[in-house]
Amino acid sequence: MSWPLLLATRLVRALLTLAVLAAVALALLRAAPGGPFDQERLAAPEVQAELARRYGLDQPFHRQYLDYVAGAIRGDFGPSYHYVDRDVGSLIADGLAVTLPLAGISLVLSLILATALSGLAVSAGASVDRLVRGTASVSAALPKFALAPLLVLLFAVTLQWLPAAGMTAGWRSWVLPVLSLTLPQAALLTRVFRALWLQALTDDAVQAAALRGLSRARLIGVHALRLALPRSVGALVPVAIALFTGSAVVETVYALPGLGRLLVAAAQNRDYTLTLGLVLTVGAIVLTISLLADLLLRVLEPRMRR
Amino acid sequence: MLLMVFSVLAQAETPNVLHRGLGPEPDTLDPQRAQGLSAQILLRDTHEGLTREDAEGRIVPGAAASWEVSGDGLIWRFQLRPGLRWADGRALTSADIVATLRRAVDPATAAPYADALRLIDGADAILKGSALPDTLGAAAEGGSVVLRLVRPRPDLPARLALPIAMPNRLDGQGRPIGTGPYRLREQRPHSHLDLERNPHHWNAAAVPIERVRWHITEDAGIEARRFAAGELHLTQTVPPGRRDQLAARYGDALRIAPAYGTFFIGLNLRRPPFKDAPALREALSLAIDRERLVRSITGLGEAPATHLLPPGLGGEPPDWAGWSTERRLAVARQRYADAGYGPDRPLTLELRFNTSLVHRRTLLAVALMWEEALGVRTRLRNEEWKVFVATRRAGVVTQAFRGGWNADLADPLDFLQLYESQSGLNYSGHVDAAYDALVDAARHGLDPALRLVQVRAAEARLMQTHALIPLYFYTTRRLVSPLLEPPVLNPLDRQPSASLRFREVSR
């Protein structure tokens, strides 16, 4: 398939997926008990009627859906029900402004760490290998909701080197959140990469190169890498998705206004438009990452182009 | 704790910015449209109505220097202070205040708290859409605002201190401009809000702290960690835990005071087993050891509650509050039997609450006490907040449920309204014409002494029929930095920034 045709097909498929996603999400939101204006102190009945009219909640489902899609095509995701002065587009833009850099930095760091550590594990002998594997297993097993508060207690409360939360201390605000996101993902990738290296080292072509008397460093750094790289793309996809869709846990612990935390708040508030907008954003991120991964694979693995 | 003190001393200099926790992101800074608690807190810094609350929560003059009321209690005249200004320096007029009130009851505004102003003549018709906002009984007469009420309401000044009655304008970028002691400098959504002293406020010279940064703090545990790391001078709350444990960790920084709030178990009086079953309700209420509950379960200085109105609002405990444990339990068992239950026919009950660790622990303890004393089998059922409020309001499947109320106003009627038959907050389906008549008389009466009698009589009726099972009175609790002068914690749990000041540090 040619590149333009491939891209066009994928784009159409992505848009259809998002349209279905919006319908399912809206149906689920409407079916979920408790509405956006359910509060302990309910507003006056007249006020509730006005709100329902204003937000189209008095309309049938298909009407609401079509209105939403029509707005979304124009780039208008509607007003937030909860943050009444804000529109959904600007709220999501705010969230992306935090989540994207956070995820980008964490992804790059995870990659660097995982590549270095897994390379070290397969090349520097059994004891180093055991140490790396052990550390990686512990880090991967440690949940973020435990790791993040531990980092805060150590670096913010006890040592007072870094802020405990918030975004008001410049680059220092980013250190602990990036660490909390990077460590578990790097651990996961280290284990996967290590397995891929070992697999690649047993490959016939690499074995043949070994017989030709190439150094182990060259075997690993050139021949095995060439084999392992395309396979590692597959392992990267879930990691990138986990990072770029925002971690509600890490964002909550560090009080960062990212996508994950926004989504949790939106769902709890039954903020239909904001939840829907965020679900579509997350959907678009997932589709984009898998498309990029496919394209990358086609570059790295010429056989796939056939 | 020591570390914290050291880090604080290391700074040994009076800070110029107050850092404090707010709670979740405010839903809006538009006082007429705000609903969430954090918006209601913040707006008391940036906006101000004709009246306001002082540090102790008392109603004092705000934009109005004084007010007088006609003999029949219907016409109120609020005399504005001379030279009032908005936060951007523009003159604030009595017409601006009237426009605010009209906007509050205009159905197009869809103000969640519009009900609070329904007492003004014409508001009801305007809200219903049958009259225009300019027919509201509010007039600007020179430097005065004159309000006409439908019936006498001594609580009008307290209501005018609520955000719904605070004047607000938008600047060119759509940011709110108020008339409060502070004004908004910058808002970083979901992160923080920066305020600075409003130089145009009539009392600006008496506002000690120049700048305030309100941090969005969604979780009490995280807020406490930020406090421990020296990032906050004042928290909105403290994480759940026992007072002695928290005191060991935070020392003198932990401050606890009584609040106008009651935690109780509500009962659905529309359906079995609680419909027409005062003996059963009494049995369940008497079987609970409230002392044990507040000592071992909640543990943050809460006072045991045997009636609805928190101390300071005129309520009175029933006789059985002074009984010995043995007598209380004996009567509970007797009433349980009177209601037709016993070992052969135990009561099976569903107790519903909104998901929260503290609620689960408290209600689990209650369920155990019921089982121990009476043999009642209780099933605890938790629901997410939005689901819970909808289920509780519908009153179709509920039996016993978590009730609780924190006052908006320092007024016993704020609590008593929960059991008025026509009240939207009457989740129990309580119907008692005599109770309604007492509350109504208290609401519109002009004689404070008579009002107190009516309030007590109304509460006594509720407690005699055991329409609810009170458990404890809430406390207000905060972590306060040693850099701050210890603030007066007020029972409405609101701490205006203008009432706070840093300690003077001698260098």
Image: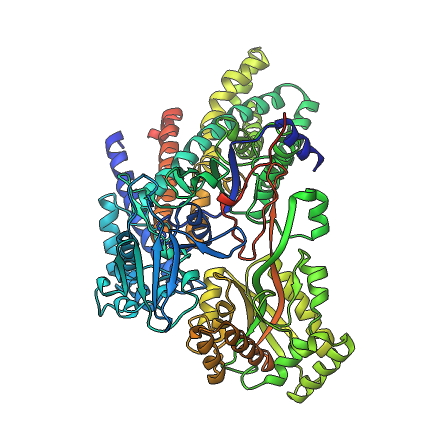
Q: With A16 as the anchor, is A31 left or right in this view?
A: right
Q: Position of residue A186 (x, y in %)?
A: 55, 30
The residue that appears at 29% across and 67% down in the rendered structure is: B123
The way the protein has been coloured in the rendering is rainbow
Query: Considering only vertical position in the picture, is B219 above or below A60?
Result: above
Q: With A38 as the anchor, is B22 left or right in this view?
A: right
Q: Position of residue B296 (x, y in %)?
A: 72, 60
Q: Position of residue B457 (x, y in %)?
A: 55, 79
The residue that appears at 73% across and 50% down in the rendered structure is: B244
B166, A200: nearer the viewer? B166
Q: Is residue B150 visible?
A: yes
Q: Is residue A258 visible?
A: no
Image quarter where the N terminus of chain B lies is: top right
The residue that appears at 44% across and 73% down in the rendered structure is: B446
Query: Considering only vertical position in the picture, is B251 above or below A81?
Result: above
Query: Considering only vertical position in the picture, is B96 above or below B392?
Result: above
Q: With A13 as the anchor, is A96 left or right in this view?
A: right
Query: Considering only vertical position in the picture, is B4 above or below B64?
Result: above
Q: Quadrant of residue B276?
A: bottom right
Q: Position of residue B262 (x, y in %)?
A: 58, 65
